[in-house]
Amino acid sequence: MRPLSHTSLFEVFLLVMSALHALPLDTSCLEGETSCNSTQQPWISTTAGMAYECYQGSSTATGMVILPFGELTAEVGKPYDVTCLIDPELGLQAEDVEFTFDGVPIPETEIGDNRIEATITSEQQGQYNLVCKHDSNVCWRKLRTGYPPLDVENLNCISRNWQALECNWTIPENAAHPSSEDYNPYLTDTDHYDEPCEQQLGCQSRDRQECCLWTNATYSPSAKHIQVYFVTKNPLGNATFKHNFNNFAIVLPNPPEEVTAEEQTPLGILVSWQTPFPLRKFPPGLVYRVDYRGLDVQTPPGLAEIGTYGNSSGRWEKEIAVRFPGITYEFELRLRSGDRSSSTPDQWEDGFSSAAARVTLATQPVAPWTTPEVGVGTFQVKRNENLGVNKLVVAWRRLPRLLHNGPGLRYVVNCPCNNTIVNKTTQEPSATFTCLFSDQSYRVTIRAQNDLGPSSTTSEVVVGTRLPAAPVLPVVVFHRGQGHYELRWRKEEGLSYTVYTCTEQVLPEEPCQGDLSWKNVGKVWSVNVTLQEMNVSAATSKVYFALSAETGDNASSGMSWDRCVTPQDYNTQRTSPTVHAVDPKSNSVDVSWGIGCYGRAGVIEELQAICCHGYNTTQCPEDATCRKNQTDVDSGLVVLGGLQPSTNYTVRLRLRYRSGLSEWSDPVPFTTENPPESPTLAPWLIAVIASGSIVALVVAAVGASYVGRKIIDTHRILSRPIVLPQGSEFQEEDKLKPQSFDYQWNNITTILRDLDEANVKSRQEEDLSVISKEILSRFSKKEMDVFNNDEVPHRTGNADNANQGGLSAYGNQSADNAGVISPGYVLAHDPAFSQSASSQASHAEDEETMYPVGVSSDGYVMIDYRNLSHEATAFSNK
């Protein structure tokens, strides 16, 4: 048998036309048929006492029939038996006939001589075709596969204003139940039973949706509970479906009536209304909800009040607190049943709240209650160092319309200038002052004012004298896929940073004229922000960014705007930098470079610079003479050191982006400077210096010669032996009384100091003996302490001159008379010592050992100059 696919429309059309042409017009249904209508008129042929039936529209051929008779309806998922009978007179065997279900041969069929029996199962509901066919002999019938009666869907019943009940529902999809006329609704309650649907008033039958309305004749509002049920059937069975309702909970009130609003205080509005009839005696009471919004100002909807009430008079009122004065408000009032949940505002949107009744009221204006908001860095300072004058631009966040409190809002700004207060009044969110000096700090105040008066509070912007440097914001990168903006800048230690946005700005040097917002981001050097974080609507088409730096004591640099003006979309293009200029020194070179905003949008992370020997205009290898990598990519300058003077070099730059390295820039040659020369002087100055140097050398030579001779002469004099004069011995009774040790030491050190001065001040060619006599004669007029053998100091007598005793010094010419003086000793004479010289002789050796003093027989004292020079220092320190 040839398998049969879906019958084409053209073939079906031919079959139907042939059948209509062959059938008589007065055909009737066979006895016992359960379903027979004008579209299913049987065609009957009788052969050998057996009836073979097919239906109109199936075939012109005779001798084939599909059983069972009547309308074919099967349940989804259950087996269904069908049979195809073949008239033996056709001369066909069952194996010659094809039996298909929805175009597919029916499997597992039992075939007799003229009978094909099959069992089919459908897992989906729908309408299918059963076909028996052999060449031009065709019989086909429709088979519906569905379910027994199903309950209605989306049943919703509403008691409209507690006066009429309206229900609507949807007939479920069921191929076994094509007609909705079999769904008959009924209403029951405690007073009425089995009330059928009264009318379909106000209902629209569409999308298999049905509805019914019961009015007061059949609907009892006072019944707390009601039931709506449906009776239905289809070829697969009969069913009744029941649904119970809380009659009070499904009441949908009419809108409140006679709604009024009256201002009690600037922020207190009394709203009153009339309860619609017949709900004034509604048992569970009603719930009201009052919402308000500004009509002349864009404001978010405000939920004012939700509450429950019930009364007999029918009128109710409630005072509503609004947030802003000087605004025209619209109030919306809605009602719902007290038996229906209303704990949250969202539950009001379930279709059981009345339509809103509206009323408007314009509240009275008052003076502003608040002042515009400012930040620590909402200003810009433009310095003129030549004039010492600054231009200060102070900005603030524009006061929202809701906070104007009345018409005519403006800002009054005060700034001290030249010992006076400069006042400016403006409607813009900024003010500019030019009479400022760099060495002064300023405190600028801003106050809001409308036609009713000024605000009672002010905002302040403080500009100090020592401000941190304004940070450079080279570019703001917009990551469109993530919806955030990336800001990067050069970090300075000890500073925190604040990011600003402005929604309207013409030029970076001009103050923000739109909405100004800011956010402190801390001690960082990069940040990602979204518009929502900056209190900016995502629908804003243009937004501008700025940055400020703050110290620990809140001294701010003021706002520094994005140098690229507008944010740049992130891209992965790696643009090479451009070398603008080179400034070579003898051992280094300053290279200035730059790149456009589009090139910066790839996020630059590092600058790499190299240089090589020679003027290499085509290339500079990466293993170059010098190399430097720096993370400072905002200054536009890189310094390469370690170069040789008077040498040719070539420099190249490239950038490391987030996505990788760029190409090297074009090579730029340069020559380092010559090594620095010594400073040159004018010829006349050189001549003066030379002449002075010669004179200084001559004087130094003469002085050195003189000093040298004096040193030699002094050494020779001090080296001569001392000849002690002979004299009578000291008598025991002539011994001097002991003197203080300090007194002795002071005289000895005085002698030594004067000797040093004498050596320096002696005139050239002056006789040494004469010098010595003059010096010693000066000391002879002083008292002098010496030490005897028993370690008791004695004081010398005083003489008027050297000839009367005094102190004397002897040169070489008196050596025969005075004896030999040891080198390094000075001889001093005093007649007081002549009487005791002999008595001291026995102790002279020990005394010399203990004290640097020698005593002769003629009263001369020999002083050890070498030892005293060291001991004098020690005593002077004491």
Image: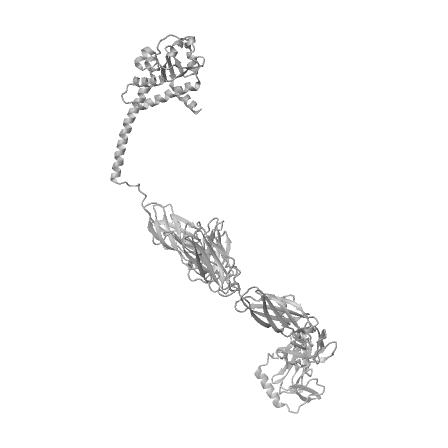
Nearest the eye: 715 or 316: 316
The answer to whether residue 311 is left or right of residue 835 is right
Whether residue 521 is situated above or below residue 791 in the rendered picture? below
Q: Quadrant of the C terminus?
A: top left
Nearest the eye: 344 or 369: 369
Q: Quadrant of residue 256?
A: bottom right
Residue drawn at (66%, 90%), measured in percent from left and top? 27
Q: Quadrant of the N terminus?
A: bottom right
Q: Quadrant of residue 259?
A: bottom right
Residue 875: x %, y % from top left: 43, 22
Whether residue 310 is situated above or below residue 84 in the rendered picture? above
The answer to whether residue 111 is left or right of residue 384 is right
Nearest the eye: 735 or 229: 735
Nearest the eye: 577 or 341: 341
Scheme of colours in the image: one colour
Residue 98: x %, y % from top left: 63, 80
Q: Is residue 449 visible?
A: yes
Q: Quadrant of residue 18?
A: bottom right
Q: Is residue 238 visible?
A: no
Residue 632: x %, y % from top left: 43, 51
Residue 596: x %, y % from top left: 40, 58
